[in-house]
Image (cartoon, grey):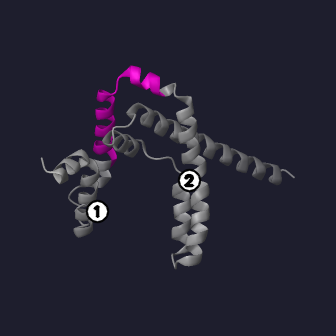
C-alpha cells in the first residue's frame, strides 16, 4: 500500500475534519442555520446522540471503572484544562492585543472560551481517533463540565451574597 494512503487511512477522522472545513468554506449556505442540513436539529440532537450512543456501545464498564480510578490523570487533565489554559490564554491575549489589530471583543471571547471544558463529543472522537483512553476522555469531559457548573454557581452565589449584604446595609 502507498505510504500516503496508509497515513490518510490511519488519520481518516482528522482528514475528514479538514475536508468538511474546506467544503464549509466553499459553500457555507449548506450548513447555515435553516439551510438544507438544518444543523440546529441534526447537529444538536442526532450527531451528538449518535456519538454518545456509539461510544456507549464500544465502552466496557470495566474500562470506565478503571478510568475513574486514575486519579493522577484526572488531576492533571482538570488542572491543565481549567487552570493552565485560561491563565495561558489571559497572557496570550495581552500579547495579541499589543501586536495585532484584533478587536478587543474577539480577544475577550478567546479568554471566555478558554475557561470552558472541552465538549464531551470532541474529546471522545479525537481520543478515539488517536487510539487513546476513551473511558478517561469521557470521564474527564463529563467531570470537567460538572466542575465548571459548580464553579459558576459558586461565583454566582458569592456575587448574589455580596449584593444582598450591600443592599441590607
Q: Is residue 62 left or right of residue 91?
A: left
Q: Nearer the viewer, residue 27 or 13?
A: 13
Q: Is residue 45 a member of the stretch shown in magenta?
A: yes
Closer-to-camera residue (10/61)? 10
Residue visible at 42% across and 25% down in the picture: 64
Magenta residues, dominant SS class: helix
Q: Residue furthest bottom?
A: 101
Image coordinates for residue 94, horizontal then vertical, percent? 61, 69
Q: Position of residue 17 (x, y in %)?
A: 28, 54
Residue 32 has which mark?
1
156 left or right, relative to 3:
right
Q: State the CA–CA distance, disc 1 to disc 2.
A: 30 Å
Sequence-wise, the earlier of marks 1 and 2 is 1
Q: How far across and down, in percent of the image, does residue 104 sit?
A: 56, 73
Element type where label 2 sits in the image: helix
Q: Quadrant of residue 133?
A: top left
Give me the disc on residue 85: 2
Q: Residue at x 25, y 58 (%)?
A: 20
Q: Which residues are magenta?
A: 44-67
56 left or right, relative to 164: left
Amino acid at each position: 500500500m502507498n505510504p500516503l494512503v496508509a497515513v490518510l487511512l490511519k488519520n481518516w477522522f482528522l482528514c475528514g475534519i479538514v475536508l468538511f472545513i474546506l467544503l464549509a468554506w466553499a459553500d457555507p449556505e449548506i450548513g447555515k442555520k435553516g439551510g438544507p442540513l438544518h444543523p440546529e436539529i441534526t447537529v444538536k440532537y442526532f450527531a451528538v446522540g449518535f456519538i454518545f450512543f456509539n461510544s456507549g456501545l464500544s465502552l466496557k464498564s470495566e474500562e470506565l471503572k478503571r478510568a475513574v480510578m486514575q486519579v493522577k490523570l484526572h488531576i492533571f487533565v482538570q488542572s491543565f484544562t481549567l487552570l493552565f489554559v485560561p491563565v495561558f490564554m489571559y497572557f496570550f491575549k495581552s500579547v495579541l492585543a499589543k501586536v495585532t489589530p484584533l478587536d478587543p471583543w474577539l480577544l475577550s471571547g478567546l479568554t471566555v472560551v478558554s475557561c470552558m471544558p472541552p465538549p464531551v463529543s470532541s474529546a471522545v472522537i479525537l481520543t478515539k481517533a488517536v487510539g487513546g483512553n476513551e473511558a478517561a476522555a469521557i470521564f474527564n469531559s463529563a467531570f470537567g463540565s460538572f466542575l465548571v457548573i459548580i464553579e459558576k454557581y459558586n461565583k454566582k452565589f458569592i456575587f448574589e451574597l455580596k449584593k444582598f449584604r450591600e443592599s441590607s446595609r
